[in-house]
Every structure is written in structure tokens, then in C-alpha cells.
Amino acid sequence: MPYSHILFQVEESGIALLTVNRPEKLNALSGALIAELADAFGRVAGEPAIRAAILTGAGEKAFVAGADIRELAALSPYAARAFALRGQAVFRQLETCGKPSVAAVNGFALGGGLELAMACTVRFASDNAKLGQPEVKLGIIPGYGGTQRLPRLVGRGRALELLLAGDPIPAAEAYRIGLVNAVVARAELLDYCRAWLGKVLANGPLALGLVLDAVDSGLDSGLEEGLRFEAAAFGISAATEDCREGTRAFLEKRRAAFTGK
Ligand code: COA
């Protein structure tokens, strides 16, 4: 699918750099843009050469300033429900694809923009970033997972504070409450993300997928089931060539060369 609203580039390291590219509207998520994200996330999930993704926004001001309010304003109740379900499914595809994703939050991450960032594995923010769920100021509620992922990330009290007042918070405060994993200078943001992913991707690829799966399934199902899942996944990881290579490399005092088998 040719893209008009995103840039998608697979770097030599296997990292897909996805830039939401609608800077004149602060990268607001239109329906057409969501369709392109769906296609791009399908590529991230399906192409073996892509091992991880970085999401960022074009321009100086915004990561993504939310769903497109002009489109939202015209939705009937049923269309609005379908709109929410569609966005949720698209974000969920990225979240569950088994590959790490990083939100490089380079400016405003509001509404659907913060929801997109929260669907990524981790969030790194530039020092100028502002994050929030301002939907209630428009008389609506978040529809792309904000009421669910925000409390899981920062706890119920802080999530409700953000969701009910609707005021954005600066990057430093987002870091303090655990909404972003680090705050870095804007000029260094993408390289910081690449460096973190570089460390991650040096590890066993199958183990990475199993960790993502174990954490998410445990959070969804509770401790007992999560522990059972972890034990089963541990068993699977012990049966891989990567496990043999990783343990042998440690004993031979060399770097492991993982093959993802
Ligand atoms: N949907 C549609 N268009 C949006 C948008 C959104 N979520 N966010 C920004 N834009 C558009 C503006 O309408 C404006 O378009 P115009 O030049 O055609 O008038 C352009 O992007 C620039 O935004 P502007 O508001 O002029 O920039 P600013 O620096 O003064 O303010 C924000 C920046 C982020 C504070 C402000 O744009 C804003 O509050 N956006 C909406 C955030 C929101 O409520 N998101 C949740 C949506 S559910």
C-alpha cells in the first residue's frame, strides 16, 4: 500500500522507523492515517527482516495530537463505536506482534497520540513533550485504549487524575509517574531509541517475544495463570537453539550469536 500520511523506512539494523507525517495538523490521526498504520503494523508483525519499530511524529511540535477532531465531530454513535474498535484493533496489533516497539514522543502526545504511545512497548520522550488525555474537554472519552492502558501504566489514581481533568503534563512529570521511561534532549531522541533497541536486539529474539507475551498475558489474567504461562514459556525457551547458543557462549566467555531458532 502506498503511504500518504506516514513515512516507513526499514533501517539496516532491522528497526522500522515509522513517522506519522501530517505535521500541518499536528499529526492528528485521520481514518486514512489509521488505515496506513494498520498496513504498516501488519508489515512490522509479518516481515521477518523487521525486528523492532520506532514510532515518532513529523515536524517540530507533535508526536500525535490526537484523533482527527474534524472527523470525530461528524460521527453517529454506531460509527463512533466502530471508529473506536478499529483504532483499538490496529494499536493492539502492534502491541501483540511479539516485537519491541518504542514511542519516540517528540512533542504533543494527546488523546489518540498518547494512546498510540501507550500501545508501544516503551516510551521515550523529548524534554519538550506534553502528554495527556484531553478528551473530556471535548465531551467525549478516550476510545483507543486510554481508559485501560493508562491505569495499567501509572495506577488508578494518577490515571483518573489525568483522564478526568484532561490537562496535559510535561515530559518530566510523565517520567516521574512512570508514563514515559526516560526523557532526553530532542536532538538525541531517535538515537537514544535506536541505542536502546540495539541493546534489546542483541538478545535472543525468541526470548524477547516470550517475555512480551508472558508479561502481557499475566497482566491480563492474574498472577496464578501468569506464573503458569511463564513456566510454559520458560520451558519453550529452554528448547531453543538460542538457549544452547546463549548458555554455551557464556561458558566460553564470548558473545552469543543468536539465530532466532
Ligand atoms: N484533530 C484535528 N486537527 C488538529 C488536531 C486534532 N486532534 N490537533 C491539532 N489540529 C490542527 C489544528 O486544528 C490546526 O489546524 P489549522 O491550522 O487548519 O487551524 C493545526 O493542527 C495546528 O494546531 P494549533 O491548535 O493551531 O496549534 P497550537 O500550537 O496552537 O496548539 C495543541 C497545539 C496541541 C494544544 C492544540 O492543537 C490542541 O489542543 N489540539 C487538540 C488536542 C486534543 O484535544 N486531542 C484529542 C483529540 S480526541
Image (tube, rainbow, N blue to C red):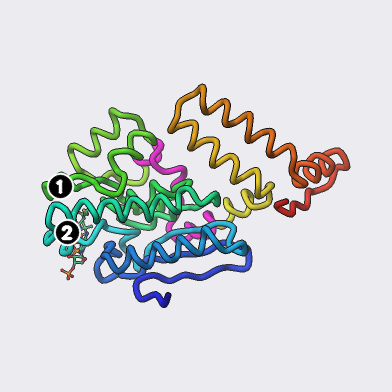
Q: Which residues are magenta?
A: 173-193
CB under 8 Å between discs 2 and 1: yes
Q: Residue at x 52, y 28 (%)?
A: 226
- Does 189 sit above or below residue 32? above
Q: Is residue 211 magenta?
A: no
Q: Residue at x 24, y 56 (%)?
A: 83
In the picture, measured across the screen, residue 154 lies left or right of residue 25, that is right
Mark 1 near ligand 1 (CB under 8 Å)?
Answer: yes
Indicate the amino acid at tag 2: Leu
Given residues 30 and 194, the one toward you in this image is 30
Give the SS element for disc 1: loop
Distance from disc 2 to disc 1, alpha carbons, whole Å, reads 10 Å
Q: Where the N terminus falls, by quadrant?
A: bottom left
Q: Residue at x 44, y 48 (%)?
A: 123
- Looking at the rendering, the quadrant in which ligand 1 lies is bottom left
Question: Mark 2, residues whose alpha carbon is within 10 Å: few (<14), some, or many (≥20)?
Answer: some
Check the image and name the residue furthest to the front.
78
Percent x, y for residue 193? 52, 55
Q: In terms of sequence position, does the residue under pointer 2 or pointer 1 come before the other? A: 2
Label 1 sits on residue: 140
* Image disc number at residue 76: none
Label 2 sits on residue: 72
Given residues 199 and 246, the one toward you in this image is 246
